Amino acid sequence: MIDSRHTTTSREKAGGAGDELRFTRTAVTLLLLGSLLLGTLGGGAAALLISRSMQRAEVSAASPANDTSPSSAIAAAEPITVAITTVGAIGDQGTPSTRPPRSALGTGVVLNLDGHILTTSGVVGEYSDVQTVFSDGREARATVVGRDEETGLAVLKVNNTAPGEPAFAAPAKLEVGERVIALGTSPTNLSRTAGDGTISALGFEAELGGRQKVDNLIQTDASAPQGGAGGPLVNEAGEVIGITLRPADAENRWSLVLPANTARAIAGKLIKNGNGPRASLAISHVMITPQIARVRKINQQGALVLTVLKGSPVAGKLKPGDVITSVNGKVVNEEQTLQARLATFRPGQRVKLRVVRGDLEVNVLALLTREQTAPALTPTALP
């Protein structure tokens, strides 16, 4: 699945180095011939000149600058990619013939050096603890810290130090059409699997089994051929863009990926508070897209309030037509959605909303409540 454009680029670089080598040999030959005719250059010096020239050409050919091949991105992400297996599947006592066969459940991503690992509820299933295998071969038993019902994200904790610290890509750097690589784990031998592709959509909306739609997903055709669930999606620099929640398969053409910043925010809440209900404003809303902005003649980004649900704590404070542009000073837009911003809070907490209402801009102090079952309206459902 690795794109041949990298191979082509490597060949072009190799071809360029070959041209340099041929040029160098021609130049050295002319110099040597001239020196023999003029008697100004001894054979030993000429040999040394040829040797040094060929060494420089070989280094140039073997060490192309700014290597952004898939293999380099995979190598960069390898230390923070974790195989997840059932407890007892590996590292058991006894002879190899009596040990259970190794079988990976899926993949995880190192969150921090404290031993927290991101994966999905689908990978860990109903287990309360699982076995993890790091890229350096170390094994560690992991407990499930918490699961997020809406996204399906799960957080594990091991007592070992991870072999590498993750580098997360800045959300603002993501672009449609950007080349990305999805990593997974082979279920039979725990080897790394990978597949590359491009980002086809940002701010994608889908139901992932929860009561609410997840509205800030990354859609991509990059999918690891095996064990991709829970694995990292990385850019060409090896920086983590997100966590694969649903890999592409025969039924689903596209992989759905939770952006890394949203995953980290949800993980922070789970680590601090464990499982629990998600916080909500008890409103129905839609994120403003360029199309909605054009139809509604709205000049700013944010979350457009459609209705305030019955019993909402912001009844009388928010009304249809309001645009929420920030939560506690953090911008709300298509990539950093209202739902994603609220994911770090729990019911009972208060947040400060920046709201545009007509020509006015006001601050609203809002009490968060439990997320209600009424789904947020999609752009196609707009009145």
Image (tube, rainbow, N blue to C red):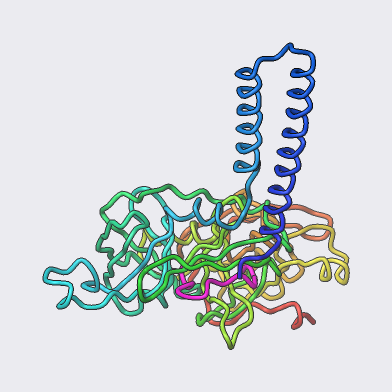
Residue occupying image coordinates x 59% and y 51%: 169
**Looking at this view, is 142 or 348 the one in front?**
142
**Looking at this view, is 97 or 314 the one in front?**
97
Q: Quadrant of residue 336?
A: bottom right
Residue 13: give x, y in percent of width and height.
71, 47
Q: Which residues are magenta?
A: 217-230
25 drawn magenta: no
Residue occupying image coordinates x 62% and y 24%: 47
Q: Which secondary structure type mostly characterizes the magenta part of the structure?
A: loop
Residue 12 visible somewhere in the drawing: yes
Residue 373: give x, y in percent of width and height.
53, 82
226 drawn magenta: yes
Residue occupying image coordinates x 29% and y 76%: 127
Q: Quadrant of the N terminus?
A: bottom right
Q: Quadrant of residue 66?
A: top right
105 relative to 300, above or below: below
238 relative to 196, above or below: above
How many marks can you see?
0
Q: For the view shown, which residue lies furthest in the top direction? A: 40
90 relative to 72, above or below: below
Residue 45: give x, y in percent of width and height.
63, 17
Instruction: Judge left or right: residue 191 versus residue 262.
Output: left
Instruction: Judge left or right: residue 148 versus residue 136.
Output: right
Q: Quadrant of the C terminus?
A: bottom right
Residue occupying image coordinates x 68% and y 48%: 14
113 relative to 21, above or below: below
Residue 228: give x, y in percent of width and height.
49, 72
Q: Quadrant of residue 297?
A: bottom right
Instruction: Judge left or right: residue 204 versus residue 232.
Output: right
